[in-house]
Amino acid sequence: MSDALWWLLAVAALIGAELFTRAFFALFVALGALVAALVAASGVSFVIQGLAMLAASVVGIVIARPPLLRAMRTGHHRFVSGAQGLVGREAVVSTAVGGINAPGKIRAQGELWTAYSDDGETIEPGAAVLILDLDGSRFIVHETPPL
């Protein structure tokens, strides 16, 4: 197998790793491996290919990664995940949801979550609710009127 093909396999593996981490390190190493694949296609030695990969990776991590991370943390580019990512979405009540002292369960995106009603009123199972906020590990919800 040629060196360029090995580098392209490394690119695919690194991009796959980046999908699970979202740290933006593997992405730039993958770009470095892509540069190494292009260099390998020209027939230079493996040492030169490795140096090209290292240089491209370091340049990407040092120059492009910081502004990319800033853009992800600020403004409308902010990446929100986990429970906080469900705020503003709809869910269905699984077990009756009452006020703060009588929480129940809601199902949002296939998972069960603890929630309580924003106005203290009981919301019956099967009702649709809007997730208003996250209070610690519990959602604050409001019943949406049926259509």
Image (tube, helix red, strand yellow):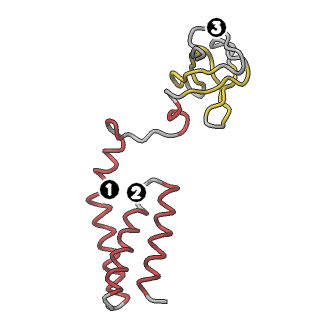
Q: Position of residue 74 (x, y in %)?
A: 32, 38
- Amino acid type assigned to the residue bearing label 2 in the image: Phe
**Residue bearing mark 1:** 65
The three-letter code of the residue at mark 1 reads Arg
Residue at the (52%, 29%) spot, across then down: 89
Instruction: Decide: is 145 above or below 22.
Output: above
Instruction: Please determine whether, in this image, residue 114 is positioned above or below residue 72.
Output: above
Q: Residue 121 carries which label?
A: 3
**Disc 1 to disc 3, how far (Cα)?**
47 Å
Look at 35% across and 85% down and name the residue there.
Answer: 40
Query: Is the Cβ of the residue at disc 1 closer than 8 Å to that at disc 2?
Result: yes
Give the label on residue 24, or none: 2
Mark 2 vs 3, N-terminal side: 2
Q: What is the distance, in whole Å, between disc 1 and disc 2 at their CAs?
A: 7 Å
Q: Position of residue 102 (x, y in %)?
A: 69, 14
Q: Left or right of 95: which side holds 77?
A: left
Comes first in the chain, label 1 or label 2:
2
Q: Quadrant of residue 24?
A: bottom left
User: Which is more toward the observer, 36 or 54?
Assistant: 36
Compared with residue 26, is residue 79 higher up or lower down, i.e. above or below? Answer: above
Q: How far apart, in angstroms, are the residues tagged by discs 2 and 3?
A: 45 Å
Within-10-Å neighbours for mark 3: few <14, some 14–19, many 20+: some
Q: Residue at x 46, y 64 (%)?
A: 15
Amino acid carrying mark 3 in the image: Glu
Q: Which secondary structure, mark 2?
A: loop
Helix, strand or loop status at disc 3 = loop
Mark toward the start of the polypeptide (1 vs 3) = 1
How would you rate the neighbour count of disc 2 (Cα within 10 Å): few for under 14, some for 14-19, many for 20 or more? some
- Could you tell whether 133 is left or right of 56 in the image? right
Q: In which quarter of the image is the C terminus?
A: top right
Q: State which quadrant residue 142 falls in.
A: top right
